[in-house]
Image (cartoon, rainbow, N blue to C red):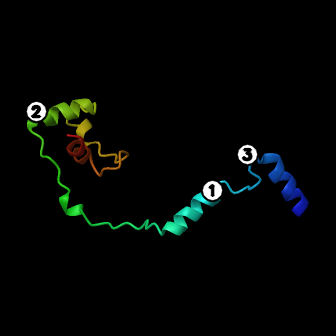
Amino acid sequence: MDKRREEQIKKHNTSDDPNPSLFEEYYKRIDDENIDFSRDYSDKSSNRHLHEPSKEEEELTWERMHKLTPEERQVNCASCGYGNCRSMMMAIG
């Protein structure tokens, strides 16, 4: 097994460096410098709000969605991920 492993390393190691670990020096530097990769997150969900479009903006958005009639605007298939067509229109508008 070790012989096969050595043969494969030799076969696939294209660098002149006999060390098969390409990132060993990089990882050692990171460890030596004690770099802190932690992150802090804060809840910003309270900042979410939707712009209430004017009637003209609404109509333009419905046209862009190819929903020209009131019937088409009430399909509510939810295939877009919104619960209804109006919610999607509001998100776009």
Residue bearing the label numbered 3: 15
Q: Which of 5 and 88 is in front in this view?
A: 5
The CA span between labels 2 and 3 is: 64 Å
Q: Quadrant of the N terminus?
A: bottom right
Amino acid residing under circle 3: Ser
Residue bearing the label numbered 1: 23
Amino acid residing under circle 2: Glu
Q: Quadrant of the C terminus?
A: top left
The CA span between labels 2 and 1 is: 58 Å
Q: Taking 89 as reference, is 43 above or below it?
A: below
Q: What element carries label 1?
A: loop
Do we see residue 28 in this rendering? yes
Q: Which of marks 3 and 1 is nearer the N terminus?
A: 3
Residue 23 on image: x %, y %: 63, 56
Q: In this view, does 67 lie to the left or right of 24?
A: left
Residue 50 on image: x %, y %: 17, 50
Q: Which of marks 2 and 3 is nearer the N terminus?
A: 3
Residue 69 on image: x %, y %: 21, 32
Quarter residue 53 falls in:
top left
Q: Taking 52 as reference, is 70 above or below it?
A: above
Label at residue 56? 2
